[in-house]
């Protein structure tokens, strides 16, 4: 069995490994940190995940394949050329049902992430997200928050007028809600990759 040692620094980094988990059935060995233990629940059903207090020096995201397309290169190198490179989470039937139930009563739901105040305002005009909500009344915009228990970069659900705000969902239920919606407006964040 191939062991892959990874030290993801954020949820998005962990999710970039899920295509490898799904395709190869490898064992993933993560550096034992609070953040890695929190996000590792997203790999349940995809691969065996273990933790070590320290990883071999060259595996802490210094591997030559690092970069935007390194999961694709690693899949190709191990004979998995026809596998999807998109992030994947294997939800249980109960989790799917919970997400669909929570989002089922909303008319045309779209996830929105108000990036103001979180250091992610790069090239985004102030008030843009509110304008999107105001100019599209046929949709229900839903903002999700992440707590410190779910992310090293916590944020509260935005206070956009006329948007539904939901905080403190477990990561796997958040993934199920995203899967039930399938549409997202916002910047590139770790939670976006749950979709």
Image: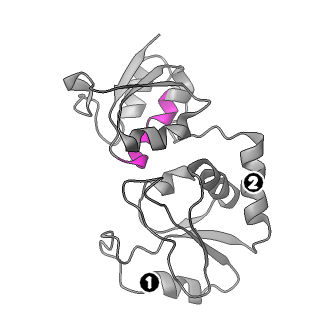
Residue 128 bears which disc, if any? 1
Which residue bears the numbered disc 2? 98
| Horizontal side, residue 51 vs residue 123: left or right | right
- Marks 1/2: CA–CA distance: 31 Å
Q: Is residue 15 visible?
A: no
Classify mark 1: helix, strand or loop.
Answer: helix
Q: Residue 12: x, y in percent? A: 42, 48
The magenta stretch spans residue 12: yes
Q: Residue 48: x, y in percent? A: 52, 23
| Horizontal side, residue 194 vs residue 139: left or right | left
Residue depicted at x 50% and y 51%:
193
How many numbered discs? 2
Residue depicted at x 36% and y 85%:
126
Categorize mark 2 by other alpha carbons within 10 Å: few (<14), some (14-19), many (20+): some
Counting residues from the start of the chain, the first of labels 1 and 2 encountered is 2
Q: Which residues are magenta?
A: 10-20
Categorize mark 1 by other alpha carbons within 10 Å: few (<14), some (14-19), many (20+): some
| Horizontal side, residue 38 vs residue 124: left or right | right
Q: Quadrant of residue 91?
A: top right
Q: Is residue 81 visible?
A: yes
Q: Main secondary structure of the magenta part?
A: helix
Residue depicted at x 47% and y 60%:
147
Q: Residue furthest top?
A: 1
In the picture shown, does residue 3 fall above or below 169?
above
Classify mark 2: helix, strand or loop.
Answer: helix
In the picture shown, does residue 103 fall above or below 37?
below
| 1 or 2: mark nearer the eye | 2
In the picture shown, does residue 76 fall above or below 154?
above
The magenta stretch spans residue 110: no
Q: Residue 105: x, y in percent? A: 80, 70
């Amino acid at each position: 069995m191939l062991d892959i040692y990874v030290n993801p620094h954020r949820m998005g980094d962990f999710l970039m490994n899920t295509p490898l988990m799904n395709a190869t059935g490898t064992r993933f060995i993560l550096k034992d940190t609070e953040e890695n233990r929190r996000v590792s629940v997203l790999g349940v059903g995809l691969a065996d995940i273990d933790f070590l207090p320290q990883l071999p020096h060259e595996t802490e995201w210094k591997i030559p394949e690092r970069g935007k397309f390194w999961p694709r290169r690693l899949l190709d190198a191990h004979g998995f050329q026809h596998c999807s490179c998109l992030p994947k989470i294997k939800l249980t039937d109960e989790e799917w049902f919970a997400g669909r139930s929570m989002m089922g009563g909303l008319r045309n739901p779209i996830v929105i992430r108000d990036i103001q105040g979180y250091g992610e305002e790069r090239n985004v005009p102030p008030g843009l997200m509110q304008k999107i909500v105001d100019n599209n009344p046929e949709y229900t915009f839903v903002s999700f928050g992440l707590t410190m228990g779910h992310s090293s970069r916590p944020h509260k659900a935005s206070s956009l007028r006329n948007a539904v705000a939901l905080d403190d969902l477990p990561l796997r239920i958040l993934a199920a809600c995203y899967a039930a919606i399938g549409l997202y407006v916002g910047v590139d964040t770790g939670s976006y990759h749950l979709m």
